[in-house]
Amino acid sequence: MTVTPQTLLRFLAGAALTAAILFVGWYFSTIVIYILVSAVLAVIGSSLVNRLSHIGIGGRRVPRWLAALLTLILFWAVFLAFCSLFVPLVFNKLYQLSTLDLGAALRSVEEPMRRAQEFLHALFSATETHFSLTEAVTRALGEVVNMESLNTLFSSIAGITFSSVVAAFSISFITFFFLKDEGLFYTMVTAFFPAKYLDNVTRALDSVTLLLSRYFVGILVESTLMTVAVSLVLMAFGMAAADAFFIGTVMGVMNVVPYAGPLIGGVISVFLGVVSPIAGAGVGHTVFVIVGTLLVLKGVDDFVLQPSLYSERVKAHPLEIFLVILIAGSLAGIVGMLLAIPSYTVLRVFAKEFFSQYRLVRRLTDKI
């Protein structure tokens, strides 16, 4: 392709516009997140709104505003039902942490830790010292889990609660109008583009809606399966149902964050096993059961579920997805990893519509 001054000027103008939009999105990131979450909820609930609005009662159809309200109430009912199960477990674990005797818990795994210490000495050819792995772990955990840290956590609950209330009200308000006024989100987005690009933007939004709806539904299914599988396996090994469900939910929720999430969830799960071991079994046995369960189920998830979710559902190569997540994690940490795939999907779709004349863009978007 021949590069002309007009082509170069158009490219620079497009790049400048993209940079400006990204800067505005970053500056008002909180509001943008509210809008995007509301848009996702509207996509999920749109089919239910359409079904409800076609129901006839007394010769008249259900108004769309009422169908949207009922759908929003259903979202809240599901969310509150989840909270009613999960939140009491969280506070119960926090109370157990505040009263935990770390020394007694670690003494129950003293023999495995002694063997680990001997292995480390042999591996690194270290000379005999007074270093104790058990004491080191006890000190490290004691610095993290103490009354001062717990008091700091509880003191921040007020601020978190206020932010959560604002977020919940904002997302609910925006979601209601996205559900009530069909096409409102499209109208908001297309308003930022010249009229001559209306068809391109509309096609891009259709593709984004399809890809992201498939992706988020897949993530929801994957998290649910992980929660149920971990809970059932741990219960089969004798763990109390409440503790097994709590660990399963932690793994299901953390599994939403690619790569880093399951590792963090695994560390939390092992620590919960130390706090609440299986009845009649020691801490070491409980930790072994948890680690074995998570490794097996995570292997199934990595090799069976995630390739379909992160690659097929967004039409991108697995290595491409891995690099995008790695870059996003370096730039914005866990939040960046969480938003990497949806953001990259949006960029690919719009790049295909507006910059398809470039070979690199065609290579990255040929499966869309």
Image (spheres, rainbow, N blue to C red):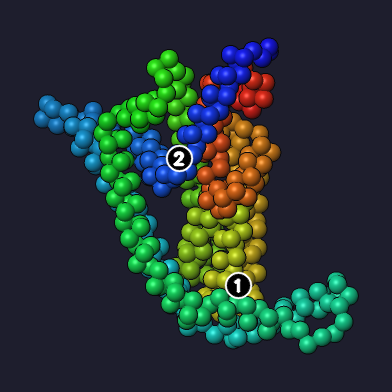
Secondary structure beneath label 1: helix
Q: Foreground residue, 164 or 302?
A: 164
**Is 270 placed above or below 262 here?**
below
- Can residue 270 be seen by looking at this rendering? yes
Q: Foreground residue, 8 or 82?
A: 8
Q: Tell me the quarter of the image containing the C terminus.
A: top right
- Residue 280 placement: quadrant: bottom right
Q: Nearer the viewer, mark 2 or mark 1?
A: 2
Residue 93 percent location from the top left of the image: 46, 73
Labelled disc at residue 25: 2
Disc 1 crowd rating (10 Å Cα; few below 14, some 14-19, many 20+) is many
Sequence-first tag of 2 and 1: 2
Q: Number of numbered discs present?
A: 2
From the image, tell me which residue sits under label 1.
Answer: 286
**Is 364 placed above or below 232 here?**
above
Please name the residue shown 40% across and 27% down the image.
192
Q: Mark 1: which amino acid?
A: Thr
Residue 342 percent location from the top left of the image: 52, 39
